[in-house]
Amino acid sequence: RKEVEQDPGPFNVPEGATVAFNCTYSNSASQSFFWYRQDCRKEPKLLMSVYSSGNEDGRFTAQLNRASQYISLLIRDSKLSDSATYLCVVTRGKLIFGQGTELSVKP
Amino acid sequence: GAGVSQSPRYKVAKRGQDVALRCDPISGHVSLFWYQQALGQGPEFLTYFQNEAQLDKSGLPSDRFFAERPEGSVSTLKIQRTQQEDSAVYLCASSSNSGASYGYTFGSGTRLTVV
């Protein structure tokens, strides 16, 4: 069992759909939490940090539940350009990645 | 340069061959990390340097893997006697913070194919 587990993908959705990604982590000593985005054959890039109070960046909302060790990402009004792999990340002195969930947004 | 530079971008090695992968971090970045990303998987941690000191090498999969950063800037990941299971993208990341949670910048990676 991996330390960071994500929904298996891929997710295929039409433009304008709302998409939810789920992630759980097993080590309660994890310190910080992030969502990264990785385009095909590119390096991972930080999408947003995740806090217990929840945080929003435009169409993107991230939430952390420390008690249940659960992290979520919601994308509203999805665009073609949102197509990518979304990586759930926790830190304990280094970045620890989930396996990623691929999203494909179709016209 | 402005970003993390990795070379070569692509490498094809025959099984049993030794390879060396280079990472040029952002100037002045203290922390440097190596990750291995197999096809369809998330990046897996290999090793971490703070300046020239290798503080964590717990992710190196075998003693065939060796990393160094002798002057605290450029780093080299060496793989001896490559095997087919070593085929992956090797990513380097650097950060200005020690023991960083934030501020990672990744390079574009080296795609290694062992035939």
Image: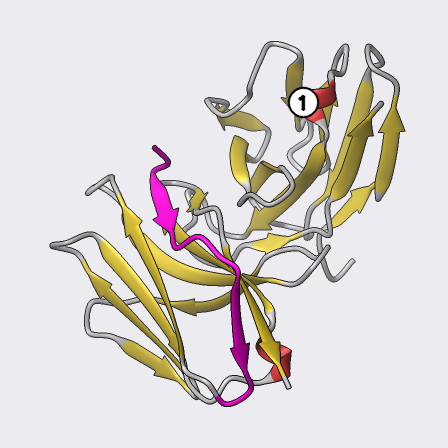
Q: Position of residue A34 (x, y in %)?
A: 39, 60
Q: How many marks?
A: 1
Residue B8, can we see it?
no
Above or below, A30 relative to B51 = below
The reply to whether the magenta stretch includes residue A7 is yes
Camera-side residue of B13 and A33: B13
Q: Residue at x 63, y 52 (%)?
A: B106
In the structure shown, which secondary structural element does the residue marked by tag 1 occupy? Answer: helix
Quadrant hosting residue A41: bottom right
Camera-side residue of A97 and A94: A97
Q: Position of residue B41 (x, y in %)?
A: 55, 43
Q: Residue at x 77, y 10 (%)?
A: B81
Q: Position of residue A80 (x, y in %)?
A: 63, 82
Above or below, A26 relative to B29 = above
In the visual, does A71 lie left or right of B50? left
Which residue range is magenta in the image?
Answer: A1-16
Q: Position of residue B2 (x, y in %)?
A: 74, 62
Camera-side residue of A32 and A69: A69
Q: Which residue is mark 1?
A: B85
Camera-side residue of B101 and A50: A50
Crowd tier of the residue under label 1, counting other residues whose Cα lies within 10 Å: few below 14, some 14–19, many 20 or above: few
Image quadrant containing the C terminus of chain B: top right
Q: Residue flagged by tag 1: what amino acid is it?
A: Glu
In the visual, does A24 lie left or right of A14? left
Q: Residue at x 55, y 42 (%)?
A: B43
Above or below, A62 relative to B73 = below
Q: Residue at x 28, y 46 (%)?
A: A25
